[in-house]
Amino acid sequence: MNRKVRTVKPSTTLRELIRLMQKTNHHLFPVIDEENTMLGIVNYNDILNIFRPFSRSVSEIVKRMPFVDSMEDEDLNLELSPEMGILIVVDDIINKNFIAVKETTSIKEARRLMRLHKLELLPVLTDKKLVGAISTLDILVYVFKEHEIIDK
């Protein structure tokens, strides 16, 4: 588990969020309040979804219809204005349905959950407070240490 987790607040603007994603090369951030309580997660898909004319699931259905023109470039044809960068905040796009684990969760169980839910990061919570995160890289390092490929 990594205890140094980059997070954002509900008040973080879209502009700040995108800059943070560029700077850190991370595409997912836990959202916490002032007391470090986990509120949800925000990622680049949440950003794109607010600009799409309909949900991702509807988009997938429409793509399968043989009589509908291709929509492959829909992400490039978004209607945007500069004001959106400061008017939209993380609280507008937060995903409150997230999977998290406790500090006592085994690596094996964490990996199972990550696979099952197609996740690259699992927040680690104690009493709803964010205390760390387990990433796919953390699990890989753990396995390599266990097999003495890298030093413990």
Image (cartoon, grey):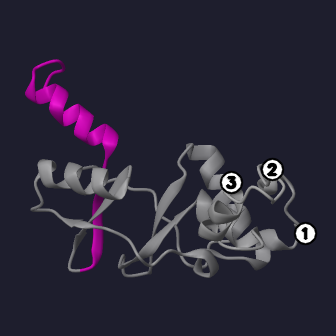
Q: Residue at image x 55%, y 52%?
A: 27
Q: Residue at image x 63%, y 81%?
A: 92
Q: Is residue 30 left or right of residue 56?
A: left
Q: Residue furthest top?
A: 149
The quarter of the rendered structure image containing the C terminus is top left
Q: Amino acid at mark 1?
A: Ser
Measured in 3D between alpha carbons, the distance from the residue under mark 2 to the one under mark 3, in whole angstroms, is 23 Å
Q: Secondary structure at mark 2?
A: loop
Which residue carries the number 1 mark?
81
Q: Amino acid at mark 2?
A: Asp
Q: Earlier in the sequence, mark 1 or mark 3?
A: 3
Q: Position of residue 128 (x, y in %)?
A: 27, 79
Q: Which residues are magenta?
A: 128-152
Which residue carries the number 2 mark?
73
Which residue carries the number 3 mark?
19
Q: Position of residue 96 (x, y in %)?
A: 45, 78
Q: Earlier in the sequence, mark 2 or mark 3?
A: 3
